[in-house]
Image (cartoon, helix red, strand yellow):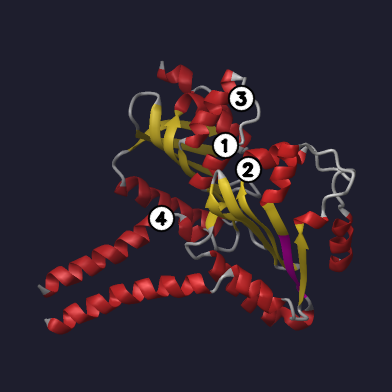
């Protein structure tokens, strides 16, 4: 009788513990850990570097840009020799993203491709946007926009202003170069 | 006492299983293409309100904001399609509140729509669709479930936007109802 109670209590407790452990394995930690890993391509870009000096953004738009702190990218290119690492790392990222911290917005999956869009914060003040995509031929990539109270409506409005005159987009070419 | 504990544990466990949804098992299966959109996405979409002066767009956004989630599973494999049919059958049996809305048979294609009654005639809490097409190469079976506070008068617009099969026929729902 008593043991039954103990068992159920410990069951419930372990549930809580599991979820707590999950939170500790944050994406931030993971990315920092992979920054020195040769299997990975990582890019870390503060948003302030992206703005050109003679941009034509108004005050509100500048505020929006400032709400975005930085852009993170991490990718693992699939080659013959790293198939095992690919599977392990993909599962690790997946399990981090499946914790309660990250809320899924959209998910797509097919035979050899998968993509998901997640975020943290709330819908009017987003802290982090994450895109995770994998392809069983090419590898996987994780793209992350970190900010503070990012307003989706403002960001979409600002998108019209994203051009080479306002932003230094040369990093795009670098990413393309790294992946090829 | 022991029984009570056992029941509580089972209840807890089964609840978490159920909340996963009966069709989620197809998500990671081979030969299945899945698409899931969550409540937060709809909330987010309704916040990005760019053409706020258009009353039609406003109505549409209003409906989008009230959606819970959309799940679409498509398979190109006839074995998986048969399994989907089985799951659909047991789902329809287990949930008595789902009633058939309409049925379309067209060129070997079989589409069935089911709804769960909402607050009034124009609203449903779930729109469920099952499509079978043995001749199709890419989509031998499609399962779609939309949950939330769904305005049937707006839903065909949404399914058309999502490129869901059968959305053409859904346009007539309104007329059928009145």
Q: Residue at x 87, y 52 (%)?
A: A168
Circles 3 and 4, Cβ within 8 Å, touching? The answer is: no
In the depicted view, which residue is nearer to us: B45 or B167? B45
Q: Is residue B133 visible?
A: no
Asked if residue A124 is among those painted magenta in the image, a careful observer would answer no
Q: Earlier in the sequence, mark 1 or mark 4?
A: 4
Q: Nearer the viewer, residue A89 or B155?
A: A89
Alpha carbon distance from label 1 to label 4: 31 Å
Residue at left offset 36%, top offset 23%:
B121
Q: Nearer the viewer, mark 3 or mark 4?
A: 3
Residues tagged 2 and 1 counted as in contact (Cβ below 8 A): yes
Q: Chain of mark 2?
A: A
Q: Can you give x and y, in whole percent of width and height, for residue A98 in the image?
A: 52, 64
| Residues beneath discs 1 and 3 located on the same chain | yes
Q: Chain of mark 1?
A: B
Query: Which residue carries the number 3 mark?
Result: B52
From the viewer's perspective, tell me whether residue B47 is left or right of residue B2.
right
**Chain of the residue where label 3 is placed in the rendered structure:** B
**In screen coordinates, is A180 left or right of A8?**
right
Are the residues flagged by discs 3 and 4 from a single subunit? yes
Asked if residue A77 lies in the magenta stretch, the reply is: yes
Residue bearing the label numbered 1: B47
Name the quadrant containing residue A58. Answer: top right
Q: Chain of mark 4?
A: B
Q: Real-space Cα distance between discs 1 and 3?
A: 11 Å
Query: Which residue corresponds to mark 4?
Result: B22
In the rendered image, residues at marks 2 and 3 fall on the same chain: no
Q: Which residues are magenta?
A: A71-78
Q: Which residue position holds label 2?
A: A152
Q: Is residue B14 above or below residue A126?
A: below
């Amino acid at each position: 009788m008593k043991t039954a109670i103990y068992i159920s209590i410990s069951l419930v407790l372990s549930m809580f513990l599991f979820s707590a452990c999950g939170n500790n394995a944050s994406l931030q930690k993971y990315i920092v850990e992979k920054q020195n890993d040769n299997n990975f391509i990582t890019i870390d870009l503060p948003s302030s570097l992206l703005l050109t000096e003679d941009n034509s953004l108004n005050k509100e738009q500048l505020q929006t840009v400032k709400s975005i702190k930085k852009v993170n990218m991490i990718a693992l290119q699939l080659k013959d020799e790293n198939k095992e690492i690919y599977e392990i790392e993909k599962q690790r990222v997946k399990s981090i993203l499946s914790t309660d911290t990250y809320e899924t917005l959209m998910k797509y999956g097919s035979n050899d491709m998968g993509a998901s869009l997640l975020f943290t914060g709330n819908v009017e003040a987003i802290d982090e946007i994450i895109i995770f995509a994998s392809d069983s031929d090419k590898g996987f990539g994780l793209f992350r926009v970190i900010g503070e109270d990012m307003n989706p409506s403002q960001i979409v409005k600002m998108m019209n202003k994203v051009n080479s005159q306002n932003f230094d987009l040369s990093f795009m070419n670098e990413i393309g170069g790294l992946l090829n | 006492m022991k029984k009570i504990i056992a029941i509580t544990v089972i209840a807890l466990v089964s609840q978490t299983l159920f909340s996963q949804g009966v069709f989620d098992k197809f998500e990671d299966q081979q030969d299945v293409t899945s698409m899931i959109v969550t409540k937060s996405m709809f909330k987010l979409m309704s916040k990005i309100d760019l053409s706020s002066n258009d009353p039609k767009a406003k109505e549409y956004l209003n409906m989008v904001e009230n959606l819970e989630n959309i799940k679409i599973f498509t398979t190109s494999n006839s074995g998986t399609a048969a399994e989907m049919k089985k799951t659909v059958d047991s789902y329809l049996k287990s949930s008595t509140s789902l009633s058939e809305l309409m049925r379309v048979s067209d060129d070997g294609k079989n589409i069935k729509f089911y709804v769960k009654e909402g607050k009034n005639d124009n609203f449903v809490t779930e729109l469920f669709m099952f499509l079978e097409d043995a001749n199709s190469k890419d989509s031998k079976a499609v399962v779609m479930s939309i949950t939330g506070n769904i305005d049937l008068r707006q839903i065909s617009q949404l399914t058309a936007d999502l490129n869901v099969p059968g959305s053409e026929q859904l346009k007539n729902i309104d007329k059928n109802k009145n």
